[in-house]
């Protein structure tokens, strides 16, 4: 089925470990982004990309890296995990807003716990 | 982008219309109003968006006041499955130099009761 696929769905990390959260979409969307959502809070934008080779920072980029080598994939890297990064991470994709597209499509999330 | 104000929570009886308000008193003429919802801990789901005119799709209707300072999302016949957090967002069209950044507030927690 077409959509946004996030892997893994659950992950437990030890403080200081690194890992990559994967996000893939098969809708040929130019726009992709990562959000985090802490308990009882709204979504906060981490990084986003408007096309292959182009990335930019969102509201809370510290501690995370991204790259966009293909249209389909937008991995999020945690360089040295900290307990403050315990959260649910959502990836989203969509047509660029300037092309008049509708809203973005979100993945089902990755639930990350850092101990 | 203009900020939005939504009530933190609302209740609605199953089968009745759910009317979710959003204030965006500082909205500019080139800013769109978008609505998303998030059911439990799932990823947010796009519902509808509009600029000036009222809009309707298979999920909901969006009513924007003539001065565009507020809007209402209408779920015509709410079901238990519509229980979710609803987010109202305004954003500038990119033809006017807007950004692809989509910033969420805290939304309205809608509870549909049987």
Image (cartoon, coloured by chain):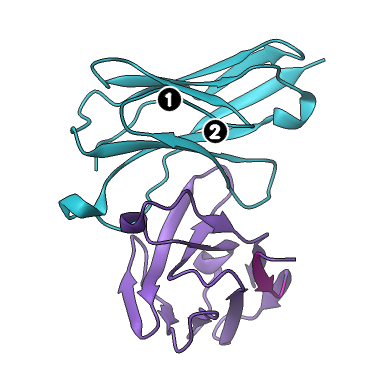
Chain colours: A purple, B cyan
Q: Secondary structure at mark 1?
A: loop
Give the labeled residue for mark 1. Answer: B6
Q: Give the residue displayed 43% in from the left and 25% down from the top.
A: B6
Looking at the rendered structure, which numbered label has been put on residue B86? Answer: 2
Q: Position of residue B59 (x, y in %)?
A: 63, 31
Q: Give the residue displayed 25% in from the left and 37% down from the top.
A: B2
Mark 2 and 1 residues: CB-CB less than 8 Å, in contact? Answer: yes
| Closer to the camera in the image, B13 or A26 | A26
Point out the stretch of residues depicted in magenta.
A3-8
Is residue B96 part of the magenta span, yes or no?
no
Tag 1, which chain?
Answer: B
State the predominant SS element of the stretch in magenta.
Answer: strand
Q: Position of residue B1 (x, y in %)?
A: 24, 43
| Closer to the camera in the image, B80 or A60 | B80
Quarter of image, res B69: top left
Q: Secondary structure at mark 2?
A: strand
Judged left or right of residue B11, residue B104 is: left
Q: Position of residue B5 (x, y in %)?
A: 36, 26
| Closer to the camera in the image, A53 or A96 | A96
Q: Mark 2 and mark 1, same subunit?
A: yes
Is residue A6 part of the magenta span, yes or no?
yes
Numbered circles on residues, count: 2
């Amino acid at each position: 089925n077409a959509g946004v696929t996030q892997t893994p769905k659950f992950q437990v990390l030890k403080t200081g470990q690194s890992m990559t959260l994967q996000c893939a979409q098969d809708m040929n969307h130019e726009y992709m982004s990562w959000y985090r959502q802490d308990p009882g809070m709204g979504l906060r934008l981490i990084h986003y990309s408007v096309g292959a080779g182009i990335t930019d920072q969102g509201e809370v980029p510290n501690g995370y890296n991204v790259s966009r080598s293909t249209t389909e994939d937008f991995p999020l890297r945690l360089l040295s995990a900290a307990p403050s990064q315990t959260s649910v991470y959502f990836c989203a994709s969509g047509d660029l807003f300037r092309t008049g597209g509708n809203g973005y499509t979100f993945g089902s999330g990755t639930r990350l716990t850092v101990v | 982008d203009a900020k939005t104000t939504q009530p933190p929570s609302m209740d609605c009886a199953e089968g009745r219309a759910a009317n979710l308000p959003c204030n965006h008193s500082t909205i500019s003429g080139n800013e769109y109003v978008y609505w998303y919802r998030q059911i439990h801990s799932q990823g947010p789901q796009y519902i509808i968006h509009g600029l000036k005119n009222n809009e309707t799709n298979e999920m909901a209707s969006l009513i924007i006041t003539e001065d565009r300072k507020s809007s209402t999302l209408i779920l015509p016949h709410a079901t238990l499955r519509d229980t979710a957090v609803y987010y109202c967002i305004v954003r500038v069209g990119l033809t006017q130099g807007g950004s692809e950044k989509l910033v969420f507030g805290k939304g309205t927690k809608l509870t549909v009761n049987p």
